[in-house]
Amino acid sequence: MALTLFDGQNFSGRSEALKAFAWREGVKGQYLHPALEVNLSGFATTVGGELRLHPEQAALPAEVRHILDDGVSALPETQKLRSLSGGETVRLIATCALRSGAPRVAMDCALEQLDAETRGRLFNGVMKPLSASVDIAVADNASADLRGGFTEVRAFGSSQLDLNAHIGEFTENLRSGMVTAPAIDLKGLSFRYPGARRPIFDRCDFRLEPGRVYLLKAPNGAGKSTLARLLTGVLKPTRGRIIVDGAAHAPSSSNARLFFYAFQNPASQVIGTSAAGYLQLISRASCNRSTMLRGEWSFTPQTIQRAFGLDPFATTEPFDLPFVALKRLTMAAALLGGAPWLYFDEPALTADENSRQALRDLFSRLCRAGFGLVVVSHGEEFDGLTEAFPLTIAEGKLQRRVDG
Amino acid sequence: MRMHAAVRWLLIIGALLVGFFASPTALAVCAFIVALAYMLLGLGGRLSSFLMLVSPIVLASAALWIFVLTDGFDAPSIGRAATRLLDGDTNFIALLRALTATSLILIAIGAIRDGETYAVMRAMALPKPAAFVFASGAALVESVREAVERSIVALRAQGLMKPTFASRSANLGRVVGLTWLAGLNLIAGRAETKWSGNRFIDRLQSESMKPATAVWDSLVGLLTFAAITSAVALGAGVIDGAHTF
């Protein structure tokens, strides 16, 4: 039995190898897909229901059971599966898989969706002890801190398909100050869901300035998605105002674009019959609406598609796109959406180190070009950016995050 | 709600009896018994949701039938029309029978503990494919509203839908399309990974997964069945003393 790292880039055959590892003939192993929702049974709607469908099949060591139970006991039994954050979903599906009694468990980019502390606890407290009786294989793009803990490393060669072949050239051509995004002042912003006991935002005052990457890290339910919905106008604040460039602005009734929101799960927002078609749709829609983006920004869908390495997928149906390409597609769409502010939810999900570096460079240059960025990320991949502004939501307010 | 499979079947039989044979008086008694059962089973919230859903239909139907039954423009009598509305085998009574029967079926198979639908269906001796379709369908129905909402958010967040009524109406096709595409994507992914590769379905079928049962829930179910069958039987005159109703 072993704890193996499947080490390689995107499109290097890691995922196929992991599936083969888990589902080799005669072995009923467990494979965890990077698109987390796919790993849920589809027979339950709540955390309690999902756990009931996955009873413990093999006696686990007491300490392992304790850590696994601890990871899911924080989730209320009646909590809806759709409301779980990425990290919570990983904890749930890992618990279901590891207590299934399967002789092999393969995790495809699931661990990287956990914060560092939870990842370390799951890896050292559960996976390492369990690897004495279960073969465990992991593909992970943020595994530097765990690398020493693997008993084996299986390296995969470089891929012929390189998503980053042209993004550097595109990034280099972004000039400083080529666009102007407005500053956004949240004044006494309050929001409470109907029937909820406490407000998500309570008289929140905060100023978002362009030229920064606001790195938002906050626990589930703190209001990360609600903030995106308020800023894109899907929800209306119950009190308070959003001031844009000194004037009151109501995103829920304004036609002018202020934010483009790229979801954590891109499959929930890509529409159309091909990747190229989707980009053209977004580009056309942006031409038909006014925007708060000022300056010279007129890239064609073809240029953005090439820059993001999506040419090989141009005619592919969104349905058939690999997860990492789907993530890229929604980020490409964000640059065609004509919005001065971009809200990216876990943009580096399943991206290999080369892609993460490309994203770091891109975000940095977009900031210098004049855009405003809000990036939700549980990992540390963007922490070192010079433009980074650590942000959190606590007690109904947006505030600067102080780590440690 | 944790009820024995046999009791669930009895409630379904009870629902059929109410649906086909309940006289107006027996129907009123049955409705009261069913409401009481909801309360005893701790399903008050579900009952109020059901009533909120069906009340407009019942009221609209009653109003329309009274309008139809109020004959004669010279001396219209609302009271007589109302009496005729509730007298015997009218269409309005048939509607009430159907709704009361539905509320009983909701107790029998609509209030299964989350995650136990497949096991309950199997315990009720349904074939595996039917249990599978029912279990996945039940979970899917609950998530449709959220999926539609997510699609609307996605369109708004990408600037594909403006905040006007006209834009919302014009983009209805996109909402449906995106909901469909995202749902299909998820189901296809699960079919490959969870259901086929990970053999979740095989394991679920091979293991004797027993649904949870509780004595109280089963007892309430049994008493409800006994009470409604008695009410229907008395109301239909099967048992002597039907006139007492």
Image (spheres, rainbow, N blue to C red):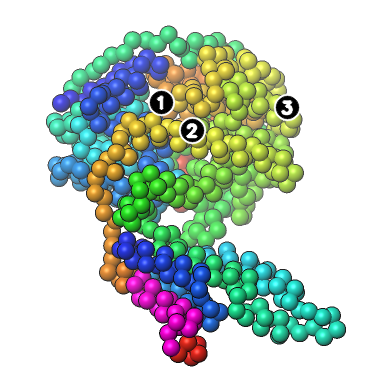
Which element carries disc 2, helix, strand or loop?
A: helix
Question: Residue A316, relative to residue A288: is it above or below?
Answer: above
Distance between mark 1 and mark 3 Cα atoms: 32 Å
Q: Nearer the viewer, residue B99 or B242?
A: B242
Residue drawn at x 51%, y 70% as measured from the top left: B20
Distance between mark 3 and mark 2 Cα atoms: 29 Å
Q: Measuring from the top left, give residue B202's x and y in whole percent.
A: 29, 38
Q: Main secondary structure of the magenta part?
A: helix
Q: Nearer the viewer, residue A386 or A314?
A: A314
Q: Nearer the viewer, residue A397 or B126?
A: B126
Q: For this view, does A64 lie left or right of residue B171?
A: left
Q: Which residues are magenta?
A: B221-240
Chain of the residue under the numbered disc 1 shown in the image? A
Q: Indicate the amino acid at tag 1.
A: Thr
Residue situated furthest right in the rendering:
B74
Question: Residue A312, relative to residue B195: is it above or below?
Answer: above
Q: Nearer the viewer, mark 3 or mark 2?
A: 2
Residue A219 is at least partly visible in this image: no
Q: Disc 1 designates what residue?
A: A350
Q: For this view, does B130 lie left or right of residue A327?
A: left
- Say which quadrant the N terminus of chain A sits in: top left
Q: Disc 2 designates what residue?
A: B185
**Mark 1 vs 3, N-terminal side:** 3
Which element carries disc 3, helix, strand or loop?
A: helix
Residue drawn at x 29%, y 43% as measured from the top left: B204
Q: Disc 3 designates what residue?
A: A287
User: Are the residues tagged 3 and 2 within 8 Å (C-beta)?
Assistant: no
Q: Measuring from the top left, give residue B196's x and y in whole percent.
A: 35, 32
Chain of the residue under the numbered disc 3 shown in the image? A
Residue drawn at x 60%, y 75% as measured from the top left: B89
Q: Nearer the viewer, residue B177 or A224?
A: B177
